[in-house]
Amino acid sequence: MSPAELFSLPFMQRALIAALVTGIAAPMIGTYLVQRRMALMGDGIGHVAVTGVAIGLVTGASPIWTAVVVTVLATFLMELIREKGRTNGDVALALMFYGGLAGGLLITGLDGQGTQTIGRYLFGSLTAISVGDVLTTMVLAAIVVVLCVGLSPQLYAIAQDADFARVAGLRVRAYNLLVAALAAVSVTVAMRTVGLLLVSALLVIPVATAQQVSRSFRATMSAAVLLGTLAAVGGLTLAALAPSGVTVQPGPTIVLLALTLYALTWPVGIWLRRRARLLEPFAAGQAAPEHDACGEHPHAHGPGCGHLAVPHDDHVDYVHDGHRHAVHGAHYDEH
Amino acid sequence: MTTASTLVAGPAVALRDGSVALGGRPILRGVDLVVHDGDFVALMGANGSGKSTLVRALVGLNPLTTGEVRLFGAPLDRHADWRRVGYVPQRASAAAGVPSSVWEVVASGRLTHRRLLRPLSRADRTAVERALDVVGLSDRRRESVGDLSGGQQQRVLIARALAGEPDLFFLDEPTAGVDLPNQQILADTLGHLKDDGATIVLVAHELGPLAPLVDRCVVMRDGRIAYDGAPLADHEVHASWFAEPHTHHHHTGSEPRTGDRSPQISAPVDSPGTERP
């Protein structure tokens, strides 16, 4: 089947739309989670969502909505544990992981289906997305995007410094619950494409990739959204183009593509950090107290001379071979 | 020293019989403190004396077990006008997970002036620019805060408080781990604020270049106010009779045994023997 034929199939178009909105929404809320050092929260939510989906499958309700309800309740519970326990909440997360997954698998078994159906939610699926699912996904993703962008000053301030935000009069607890709820919604948005077991990857990997090269929060979030969209849509396309006879699930493809993007950016990040460290200005006032001119120096230092130029007090030191040469009249001083 | 009349008049800060317990342990015990408009007060004391706990209680971050805080005469729980308060927390040791630019952190100081779902106004941007200018970091606004030195990060936090244009500042250890040139810049900044009539309450282990600015010194020991009066030099604050009750055999000649021997002392200085519970 040619790619053109493939993309003209309605189920494929639905899957692409779902991947697109997932790729936009998930990294947005993921940026706030990474900022607050709660990168693994998405995983906890994903596991709890298994229970939500199972309840939906068994009762015949829409699995997306039951997953939203169950995960939002679970994240509220987790925020409470985190707040009362004065810990990082990693134990609370662990409880969510185990309880959610075990509960989900147990409940699915109740109506005798086994794990066949729930597998589509665990690993993502190309073909199982209905028109109703796409619409629900789009609405939920739109809610996440609007709130993440609209409330960005508040959410940013709280993620950056909760104490300061509280003294600025923000109701930090309410906003924390909102972030938790948005994370839960993002997970349910992403579960049809990436699958619940890998959903956190789309929340975290694009952000980790973006912050290799970014210096501001806004740039990190924008780049993460771009990378997330690229990974989600690209991964889905790759999975769909796989030759017949091989089963390629979209979830792993999307995650591996996102990881590849990270691996490509990583050396750039290392280089940027090393350069920033080298170019850091020397501490003021540490030049030798007495005049210490260097010997014969045939090379003329200057902007673009090829040597590392580092600010030092009111002048520039040129660094080469372990020396710091500063221009002084017609010669160079050792600094 | 706190009377009903001063509460009605609404001094900048009024704490009456404030006690704070953290994790069940009493940290502050029955502290009374009034700071009048335009005062520059330094809260000093040894590590663990409760000075940071006190300043966090004053801004509502540590709930009081007894007593009441009023800022400008309004109780803290109903105190609606956070615009008048600028808080500079202790510098976090680790940067947050995602890089933030200097401008972004300072701009978050405008939160108290922003309405929900509205972009930054022209006034907001001007205030952010001015705050960056005051602390001398205008040329580094695009850089990531994590790439700055400790002293520069402290200046960023002060600029964030400045951006909200408050008239009451609480600073928690602004000079800790900051090199001398940066401390001097801090002192200059605070000097400008003081000249503009701002009320400043700062926690410090040592005053250093801030010393000339201080109008009043409050020394904490063991969760109580041990001294409240004219500014003290750093070595006096950390003299044995304030900081370490059990080593008072040094400086016996200069040691005031009771409050009435030092006329500037308004809170009783307990003698070392009776201080410990």
Image (spheres, rainbow, N blue to C red):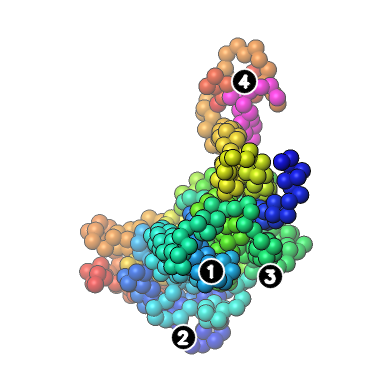
The chain to which mark 4 is attached is A
Total number of numbered discs in the rendering: 4
The crowd level at tag 1 (other Cα within 10 Å; few <14, some 14-19, many 20+) is some
Instruction: Tell me the CA gap for discs 1 and 4.
Output: 77 Å
Q: Secondary structure at mark 2?
A: loop
Q: Nearer the viewer, residue B178 or A82?
A: A82
What's the residue at 66%, 41% (across, down)? A241
Q: Quadrant of residue A171?
A: bottom right
**Chain under numbered label 2:** B
- The answer to whether mark 1 and mark 2 are in CB contact below 8 A is no
> Magenta segment, which residues?
A304-319
Subunit ID for the residue under disc 3: B
Q: Which mark is residue A332?
A: 4
- In this view of the protein, which residue sits in the foreground, B46 or B272? B46
The answer to which of marks 1 and 4 sits earlier in the sequence is: 1
Q: Is residue A288 above or below residue B57?
A: above
Q: Which residue is mark 1?
A: A56
The answer to whether residue A307 is magenta is yes
Task: Give the x, y percent position of residue A320.
Answer: 58, 21
